[in-house]
Structure formats: structure tokens, C-alpha cells
């Protein structure tokens, strides 16, 4: 027995075991196991492969094809009988189950074009609805999709390079070389999901939790062309996957906020999430409210918020429009993460604040008036004219003016000093004009309150002058006393 084992270990390998890096695949559809090429309908022509034994009963379970082969184009669907189209569909899937090497544009040009044309035909076949594909065809099609789209993503430009991380807005994204094929595979998957002929009960057997998890991982791709809205279609069609998708998005956000602050798909995830939030029913689940507080609001903190702020703002506003009682939490969350020295982020925050206030009711507005308008007062006095200007533009919104008018007794005393300082000291003439308009608006709202605030402001200024004069007198007395004791040793500043 031992001698037999030794002899078996020295068995000579056939040429069918050779591997070439030009093709990458996981096996042909309908072959029964990964990598098998024993199916009689295989369209790869092995006749040109030297040493291949067509009668071999032990197919090589390799994930790549050998160097010498030819891919033959198949007839069009319209050129075969209706009864043969399902078999032809499977044979076309077999061609598409191999990933070609795009690192060399001059290599395998004919095979690349055949695969591209085959993918186009598959997309047209699914889109036309000319025939309902069988469950086996659906299974093999998803296998083909898995082979093509689920791949190892290259490291981001800031990873493993030893270089200092750059601003995400300044980085050049990595573009997938195989996009001519990848785009069509995505399109095929999308047409399959949205097709009215697709049976959800059958489809969910193949588009399972593992498939969805890997699809979400692709959001880390730097290529902006990746068709990521497929996830939203899956969320809408497969209710069984909805908790998994929400949890996975949560985890990506947490990792981004508290660990890496680097991810290429935050904006796309937020865009999908905006559509999901729009479909929430009332009363809103506690899970969704926690997601707002623990994930969405902290997303305002990272430095790269400007990259995805538009989508983030839309999601947050959707929450407030769905449940106006969340306005107080959202406003206080914005104030918590309000930028201190980044003026461009302040402009973004002020724009989002205006949208939130538009959906805010009086009761929620009154809960956060004091901290809110203290921050607005600081923005009014900003030396950066765009921040000051954006804060003054809040009074161009009729809904906000209505909220302010109903609560002017609290608001005007908080911001009156900031408005007066703008009139007296701000360097930008446009700010002077906008500030004068806001003061005029308050004067028309309540002249008596305006006079009271003006009187208090003048009294405060008079007290400040008195304090300054007293300080100067004290310093003069100290200087005189020092001069009397020893003027020669006194140092004046």
C-alpha cells in the first residue's frame, strides 16, 4: 500500500494542469462543481489546446483556463428556436464566466470583444422579456455575476504607501480596467432584479445574505462608475435582506467615524439611505431613531464631510420631515459637531440648519432656542464674510422668520449685540446692508422690544468704557508708583 502511495505521488501531470493568468474564473455554469469544464455545451474550443484529452473523465478543477484556447461566438437568440433559447442562454453564460486580463490592452482582444457582445445579448434578452428564464438559468446567471463583480479591490492610494494621507477630494480614484465588461454584468443584474418576470421566492435563494454582504463591500471601490444603486433595488424587492442591509450600513458608518475616516462609498450609501428613510412608516421604530443619533449625526464630525454632506443633509432632513419631534435632537447634534475654525464647513452646516428649521415646529424650536441663537450670533460676527452672509440669509426664509417672530422676546436679546457689532465693525459692505435689513425687520416686529435691547446695549457699552477707563487709571497709578521708587530700573512696554 505504501509503494502504491509513493507511485501515485510521482504521477506525471498532464498539460491540462497548466495555468495562464489571462483568464480568471470559478467554473462554468452547469458544470456541477467549481472549475469543471466537462459539460457538453461548453463553448470554449479546446481543440486548439495541445495535449487535451476530450475523453478524460477527470476534468481539472482549475479556476483558470490554459494558455492555448479559442472562444467561439454563439448564434443570436433570434436565430434559434424558442425551445433552444434556455440552453443557448446557459452557453452564453459560460463564455462570460471567465474574467479576462485587462492589464494588457493588446492581449486577447478577440476574446474580450466576444465576451462584451455576449453580455450585451444577455442584457437585451432579460430586458426584452422574450422568455421567462428557468430557475437553473437564474442560478447560473447569479454564479456568473459573482465571478465577475466580486473581486479583490486594490488598496486605496493612502494605504501601504508610506505617504501622508491627502484630502479625499484631491485624490485621483482608481478606475477598474475591466469596466467594459463589469458595467454590462451590473446592468444584467439590475435588469434581472427589476424585471417583473423575476420570482422573488426563487431569486432570494441565489441573492442571499452572503451575496448582499459582498455587494455592500464593493462600496469601498474608488471607481465612481460602480453601479451601486443595485443595493437599493435589492432592499426594495427582498424584504428578508432589509435588516442585514441596514446593519451593514451602520457598521460601515461606525468604522468610518471612529476608526478610519476613509471610505469611498459613504456618499452612495447615504444616497441609498435617503430613499430608504423616505419610505419609513410612522410611528418610526426606535431602531431608526438610534441610527439617526448614533450614526448620521456623528457623520458631521469627520474632516471629509464636505465630500458627502449633500447626501447626509438630505437623510437628516428626511428624518425631521417624517417625525418633527426629532428636530430638537438634530439641531443639538449639529451644534455639538459645529466646526470651530473651518469656515467652509460652517457654511455647509448653516445650509443644513436652514433645511432642518424649515421642517421644525414651534414646540421643538423653543427647546433649543438659546444654544441655537448663541451659535448663530457667533456666525453673524464671523470675519469670514461667507459665514456671516449665510447666517444672515436665514432671515430670507419665511418659515424661519415666523418662528423668530413668535419667539422674538428670547431671540433678539441674544443676537442684538452681534448685529450691532456687524454694523459698526464688520469689514464687508455687503454684510452691513444685510445686517441693516435684519435690524429693520426686528424693529418692525416689535419697536418697544427693539428699543429695550438698544438701551441695554448702550448701557453695556457704557459699562465697558467705564471698566476700560478704570483699568487705564490703575495702570497709570502703578506706573507712577514704580517711577517714584526707581524709574531707572522700570521697563516700559
Image (spheres, helix red, strand yellow):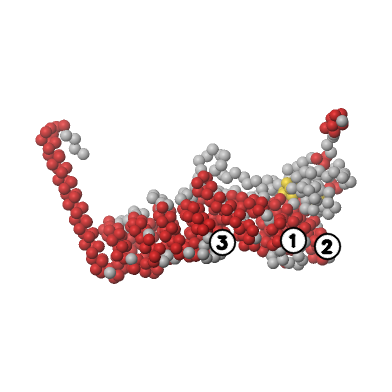
Q: Residue furthest right?
A: 55
Q: Quadrant of residue 448?
A: bottom left
Q: Judge from the rendering whether residue 55 lies leftward or rightward of residue 427; answer left or right.
A: right
Mark toward the start of the polypeptide (2 vs 3):
2
User: What kind of element bears circle 3?
Assistant: helix
* Image quadrant assignment for residue 280: bottom right
Residue 321, x across and y down, in percent: 48, 65
Q: Residues within 10 Å of mark 1 (few under 14, many from 20)?
A: some
Q: Where, by quadrant of the figure, is residue 185 drawn? A: bottom right
* Image depth: mark 2 or mark 3 in front: 3
**Res. 76 visible in picture:** no
- Report helix, strand or loop for mark 2: helix
Quadrant of the snapshot with the N terminus: top right
Q: CA distance from mark 1 to mark 2?
A: 15 Å
Question: Residue 121 — which label?
Answer: 1
First reached walking from the N terminus: tag 1 or tag 3: 1
Where residue 182 appears, x then y in whole percent? 67, 54
Residue at position x 23%, y 64% in the image: 452
Residue position for label 2: 84
Of all residues, the one furthest to the left in this rendering is: 484
Q: Toward the viewer: 386 or 4?
A: 4
Residue at the image point whose x is 19% and y is 49% from the top: 468
Query: Residue at left 73%, top 53%?
Result: 143
Give me the C-alpha separation between circle 1 and circle 3: 33 Å
Which is in the foreground here, disc 1 or disc 2?
2
Q: Which mark is residue 276?
A: 3
Contact, mark 1 vs mark 3 (Cβ under 8 Å): no
Q: Is residue 405 left or right of residue 133?
A: left
Amino acid at each position: 500500500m505504501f509503494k502504491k502511495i509513493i507511485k501515485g505521488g510521482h504521477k506525471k501531470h498532464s498539460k491540462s494542469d497548466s495555468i495562464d493568468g489571462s483568464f480568471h474564473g470559478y467554473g462554468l455554469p452547469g458544470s456541477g462543481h467549481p472549475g469543471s469544464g466537462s459539460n457538453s455545451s461548453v463553448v470554449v474550443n479546446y481543440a486548439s489546446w495541445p495535449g487535451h484529452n476530450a475523453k478524460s473523465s477527470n476534468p481539472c478543477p482549475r479556476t483558470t483556463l490554459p494558455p492555448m484556447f479559442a472562444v467561439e461566438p454563439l448564434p443570436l437568440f433570434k436565430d434559434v428556436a424558442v425551445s433552444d433559447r434556455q440552453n443557448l442562454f446557459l452557453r452564453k453564460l459560460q463564455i462570460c464566466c471567465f474574467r479576462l486580463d485587462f492589464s494588457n490592452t493588446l492581449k486577447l482582444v478577440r476574446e474580450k470583444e466576444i465576451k462584451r457582445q455576449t453580455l450585451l445579448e444577455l442584457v437585451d434578452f432579460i430586458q426584452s422579456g422574450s422568455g421567462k428564464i428557468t430557475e437553473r438559468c437564474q442560478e447560473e446567471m447569479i454564479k456568473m455575476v459573482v465571478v465577475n463583480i466580486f473581486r479583490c479591490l486594490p488598496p486605496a492610494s493612502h494605504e501601504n504607501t508610506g505617504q501622508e494621507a491627502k484630502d479625499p477630494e484631491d485624490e485621483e480614484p482608481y478606475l477598474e480596467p475591466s469596466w467594459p465588461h463589469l458595467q454590462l454584468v451590473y446592468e444584467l443584474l439590475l435588469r434581472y432584479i427589476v424585471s417583473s418576470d423575476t420570482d422573488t421566492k426563487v431569486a432570494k435563494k441565489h441573492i442571499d445574505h452572503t451575496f448582499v454582504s459582498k455587494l455592500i463591500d464593493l462600496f469601498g471601490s474608488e471607481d465612481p462608475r460602480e453601479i451601486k444603486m443595485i443595493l437599493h433595488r435589492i432592499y426594495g424587492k427582498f424584504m428578508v435582506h432589509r435588516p442585514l442591509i441596514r446593519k451593514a450600513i451602520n457598521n460601515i458608518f461606525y468604522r468610518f467615524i471612529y476608526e478610519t475616516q476613509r471610505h469611498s462609498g459613504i456618499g452612495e450609501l447615504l444616497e441609498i439611505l435617503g430613499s430608504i428613510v423616505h419610505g419609513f412608516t410612522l410611528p418610526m421604530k426606535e431602531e431608526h431613531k438610534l441610527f439617526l443619533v448614533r450614526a448620521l449625526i456623528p457623520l458631521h464630525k469627520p474632516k471629509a464631510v464636505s465630500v458627502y454632506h449633500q447626501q447626509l443633509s438630505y437623510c437628516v432632513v428626511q428624518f425631521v420631515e417624517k417625525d418633527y419631534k426629532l428636530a430638537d435632537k438634530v439641531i443639538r447634534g449639529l451644534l455639538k459637531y459645529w466646526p470651530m475654525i473651518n469656515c467652509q464647513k460652517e457654511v455647509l452646516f448653516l445650509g443644513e440648519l436652514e433645511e432642518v428649521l424649515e421642517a421644525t415646529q414651534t414646540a421643538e424650536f423653543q427647546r433649543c432656542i438659546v444654544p441655537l441663537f448663541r451659535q448663530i450670533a457667533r456666525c453673524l460676527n464671523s470675519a469670514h464674510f461667507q459665514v456671516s452672509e449665510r447666517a444672515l440669509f436665514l432671515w430670507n426664509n419665511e418659515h424661519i422668520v415666523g418662528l423668530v417672530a413668535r419667539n422674538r422676546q428670547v431671540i433678539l436679546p441674544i443676537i442684538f449685540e452681534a448685529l450691532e457689532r456687524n454694523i459698526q465693525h464688520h469689514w464687508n459692505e455687503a454684510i452691513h446692508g444685510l445686517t441693516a435689513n435684519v435690524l429693520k425687520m426686528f424693529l418692525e416686529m416689535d419697536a418697544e422690544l427693539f428699543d429695550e435691547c438698544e438701551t441695554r446695549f448702550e448701557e453695556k457699552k457704557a459699562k465697558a468704557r467705564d471698566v476700560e477707563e478704570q483699568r487705564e487709571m490703575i495702570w497709570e497709578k502703578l506706573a507712577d508708583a514704580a517711577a517714584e521708587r526707581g524709574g531707572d530700573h522700570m521697563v516700559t512696554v
